[in-house]
Image: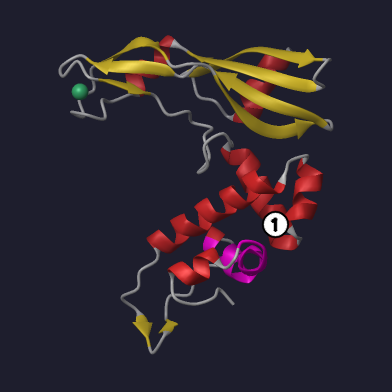
Amino acid sequence: MLPEKGFQKILGLGDGWQVQQVDYVEKASKVLIRIQETAALWASESCPHCNCKSVGGYDHAPERTWRHLNVCQLQSEIVCALPRGQGKDCKKGYTVRAPWEGRRRGLPQEFEAFALTLMRAMPVSKAGEILGETDRPLWRALFAHVDAAWSELSWENVVGGRRRDEPQAGTPLADGLRGPASQAGAAGGGRQGRRHGGTFC
Ligand SMILES: [Zn+2]
């Protein structure tokens, strides 16, 4: 199997995206996974300005990288110049969102999911050692997921300071409440606790 086809499957890219090339850069000890859109992408796009389905490719945004999970202990990155589309009715442009983008800019969903799994079980610094990453992007990913979980939570059922709708086990909020957020209170200065008027634990 060609590595490009293997990564196409691993990343779960639909027919709108294609792994163009996978390279090992020896000097940087990195694996670069280059992805580009295909013509099929535009059939599934709609204009974010007027919601029309008639969208075509216009040009490309500057090339960006996303930190991906390591490949056999080697740091790997997704590299892509995201396409910019244009609504054919309104003539307004927009940058297509990468399907692998996580909640934090520069981190793919798979990386965030694995990082959250590790941070549920161990200190962030230890998770960073395993992932080959510094603490900062991991904290940012964690805060982004906890923020998202808070925003999705309904407070209509709060009675006497206690929620009836406890978050389901396995959700980012439940994870945040159970483990990493308590670390956030210590290492991150209790950011969430201040915002929501209490601590997580
Ligand atoms: Zn439009």
Q: Secondary structure at mark 1?
A: helix
Q: Residue 2 is drawn in which quadrant?
A: top right
Q: Which residue is mark 1?
A: 119
Furthest residue toward front = 189
**Residue toward you, 44 or 108:** 108
Residue 170 versus residue 57 in the image, above or below: below
Furthest residue toward left = 89
Looking at the picture, which amino acid does disc 1 mark? Met
Give the magenta range.
173-188
Q: Quadrant of the C terminus?
A: bottom right
Q: Going 65% across and 63% down the picture, which residue do you hit?
A: 180
Q: Is residue 113 left or right of residue 191?
A: right
**Residue toward you, 4 or 130:** 130
Residue 27: x and y in percent read: 83, 15
**Residue toward you, 5 or 162:** 162
Residue 98: x and y in percent read: 48, 28
